Every structure is written in structure tokens, then in C-alpha cells.
Amino acid sequence: QVQLVESGGGLVQAGGSLRLSCAASGRTFSTGYTGWFRQAPGKEREFVATIRWTNGNTYYTDSVKGRFTISTDNAKNTVYLQMNSLKPEDTAVYYCAALNRDYTSSYYYQKAPLYDSWGQGTQVTVSS
């Protein structure tokens, strides 16, 4: 079982940037996906972005395309989420998650219940 630890959250003004980090231990990623989800108060956890380890392909929810970038540092077994042009509606707890199975359909990698391991979450607050 992989352990995931997020960091990098905080308070930022609208238009600002943050970089979240997800450090993994217990497993070296080579297959499956590692992604980011977020959950705002009173809302369901939603997919933000993920990266597929077999080919490096990245996927984003429409609301963050062009603003957020997911990347990896394989040597550090760490996944990053660079968030630019932040908006108040980006305010949420952000979670890193690992999906072991290498699904080929986009239907699956957006589904939070399919992810096998989760971090504890990091708060991102964007003020207007």
C-alpha cells in the first residue's frame, strides 16, 4: 500500500499561484494513475487532474485546463500540481490519490472510488 503525503496548500489571492506536492512512499509508480481531486464544503469530491504512468499522458477537468499542470519527479517519487490564475471557486481541500489499475478509458480515471490510496488532503483557499 502506497502512502501519499500532500503539501503546498495555503491562502492566496485570486490570480495567484500555488504548487501542491504529493510525495509517495511504499511504492514506485510505474503503472496506473496518480491524480488530484478536490472537495469544497458541502460538495462532492471532484476530479481535477491525473497522470498515467505508462505513457505520461495527462488529463484535466475542463474548469482547470490551461491553468493547472500536473507533473512528476520520478527520482523523488513525487507528483506536483501547479495551479496558476487561481479563482475563488478553486477553494477546496485537495487530495492526492493513486490508482493501481491501468485503465485505458477516461471514464475510469475520473472516478474517485476507484482510486486505491489517498493522502490526507491540503487546504487551498483563494480570496477574491
Image (spheres, helix red, strand yellow):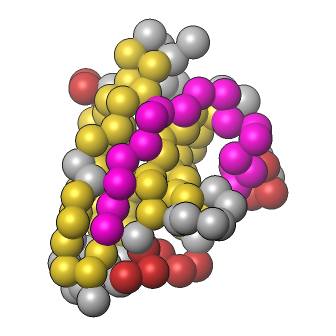
Q: What residue sits 55% from the left and 65% below the top? A: 41
| Residue range highlighted in magenta | 109-125
* Residue 118: x %, y % from top left: 54, 32
Q: Quadrant of the N terminus?
A: top right
The residue furthest front is 42
Q: What residue sits 27% from the left and 41% below the top? A: 7
Q: What residue sits 35% from the left and 83% below the top? A: 87
* Residue 13: x %, y % from top left: 19, 80
Q: Quadrant of residue 78?
A: top left
Name the side, left or right, on which 50 lies relative to 91.
right
Q: Where 95 sits versus 4, above or below? A: below
Tell me if residue 50 is in the magenta stretch: no
Q: Where 104 sits versus 18, above or below? A: above
Tell me if residue 111 is in the magenta stretch: yes
Q: Is residue 60 visible?
A: yes
* Residue 22: x %, y % from top left: 35, 37
